[in-house]
Amino acid sequence: MGSGLNYQKELDKILEELAEAGTVPRLLLHSCCAPCSSYVLEYLSEYFSITVYYYNPNIYPESEYEKRINEQQSLLLRMPFHHPVSFLAGPYEKEKFYAMAKGLETEEEGGSRCMKCYELRLREAARVAKEGRFDYFTTTLSISPQKNAQALNAIGLRLADEYGVKYLVSDFKKKDGYKRSIELSREYDLYRQNYCGCEFSKKASV
């Protein structure tokens, strides 16, 4: 799959094929936060047995990390799902994030530091998906209007080849996905953060 593709249409095709086959594959869903995951879980749990993988070493400070991971787990306990949804906490390896960001501290949001951060998190998701013998892995990140879906899918597909696990392409902001995530956030009274997560994005949001 090259650039310029409509990733929502590609996802529609995959979901249609799964529905016709009557199979329910296992999906490892990397989640950045509860609000972003809400719509994605509502949407994909009709087709997959999902494990939400919370791996976000970029989040700053640690109190913010705890708040976000707790909110994620709370949502999973309260939301109804078509197929089972479970939770897996990744390690909080903030030193890995800072090592990755070294020399890129002054980059603008959405630049090369963010691209490397996407890859850091998706690489860990691919590794865990392979180890756990999942059928697919993907991320909630493409739901954000601030996130580059083309870049995310390119990273995911490259890692899929590297690890031998299928990457579920997506652009979850399509079909009013972002709007629906806001509605679900209100419905479940979710904590919605005002910055992406890292120390640099927090400074940029002030």
Image: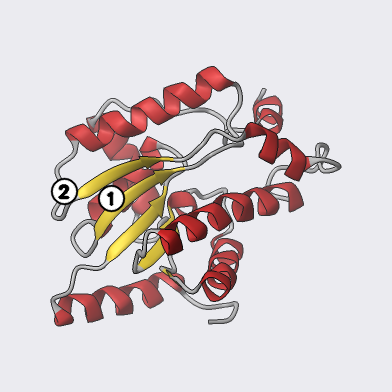
| Residue 15 x, y percent position in the rendering | 27, 73
Give the residue pinned by disc 2: 81
Displayed quadrant of residue 159: bottom right
The coloring applied to the image is secondary structure
Residue drawn at (36%, 72%), measured in percent from left and top? Answer: 11
Element class at badge 2: loop
Residue 187 screen position, x and y as percent: 23, 31
Taking 187 as reference, is 6 above or below it? below
- The answer to whether residue 118 is seen in the rendering is yes
Which residue is identified by label 1? 41
- Residue at point 27%, 33% (across, down): 75
Identity of the residue furthest to the front in this view: 131
Q: Going by the image, does 20 lie left or right of 190?
A: left
Q: Residue at x 37, y 59 (%)?
A: 132
Q: Quadrant of residue 189?
A: top left
The crowd level at tag 2 (other Cα within 10 Å; few <14, some 14-19, many 20+) is some
- The CA distance from mark 1 to mark 2 is 8 Å
Q: Nearer the viewer, residue 185 or 22?
A: 22
Q: Amino acid at mark 1?
A: Leu
| Numbered badge on residue 133 | none
Q: Toward which corner of the image does residue 166 lie, by quadrant?
A: bottom left
Residue at 60% x, 77% y is 3
Question: Vertical placement of 31 versus 75: above or below?
Answer: below
Confirm or deny contact between disc 1 and disc 2 (CB under 8 A): yes
Amino acid type, residue under disc 2 in the picture: Phe
